[in-house]
Image (tube, rainbow, N blue to C red):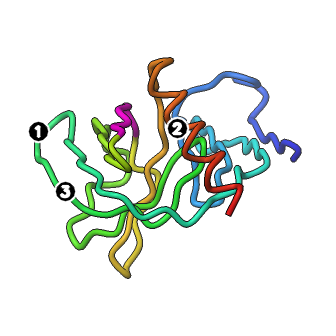
Amino acid sequence: MGSFYAWDGNRAGEETDLAWDSNHAKVEAWDGCFSVHTHPRARRYSFVATIELTDVQSEAKIQERTSDLSLFGCRVETHEPFPTGAKARIRIAHRGANFVALGRVSYTTSDGGMGIAFTQIEPTNQLILEKWVEELRGH
């Protein structure tokens, strides 16, 4: 809930390489210097549904199951994770509704999972996601 900045004095505030670590902190780096911006993590809810992921670059496709969901992403149980940073098209089917978005693999784990951060959601799909999360909050 704060920020930490470090720089060499020549490039203060310049953003270059950007990533999110497994604790959902934005990490920016340039020439060996970095800054980290943290924000409160969205609450995750247990959520099992069929998910289809397509790697945007390779067009590799997998169909797996989610294990949790938030307004900003989900965890996928898979023994064939995409590489961290890979961009993916996402389709989640649950109770007759289909949620579609673009996302990025934010982390992979050795126990067969990967985290997906949603990066682009159309308004109609945002409503589907919000409805699912609201239903999960009630349980």
Indicate yes or no whether the magenta region holds residue 2.
no
Label located before the other in sequence (1 or 2): 1
Q: Nearer the viewer, mark 2 or mark 3?
A: 2
Disc 1 crowd, CA 10 A, few/some/many (<14, 14-19, 20+): few
The image quadrant that residue 13 belongs to is: top right
Stretch in magenta: 97-103
Q: Residue at x 39, y 49 (%)?
A: 105
State how far apart marks 2 and 3 are (Cα).
19 Å
Q: Residue at x 61, y 61 (%)?
A: 45
Q: Residue at x 60, y 42 (%)?
A: 71
- Image quadrant containing the C terminus: bottom right
Residue 134 pos. (x, y %): 66, 45
Label located before the other in sequence (2 or 3): 3
User: Could you tell whether 4 is left or right of 79 in the image?
Assistant: right
Residue 21 pos. (x, y %): 58, 54
Indicate yes or no whether the magenta region holds residue 102.
yes
- In the picture of the structure, the residue carrying the numbered disc 1 is 59
Residue 60 pos. (x, y %): 11, 46
- In the picture of the structure, the residue carrying the numbered disc 3 is 63
Mark 2 touches mark 3? (CB < 8 Å):
no
Three-letter amino acid code of the residue under disc 3: Gln
State how far apart marks 1 and 2 are (Cα).
25 Å
Q: Residue furthest top?
A: 123
Q: Nearer the viewer, mark 1 or mark 2?
A: 2
Disc 3 crowd, CA 10 A, few/some/many (<14, 14-19, 20+): some
Can residue 79 be seen at all in this image of the molecule? yes
Under circle 1, the secondary element is loop
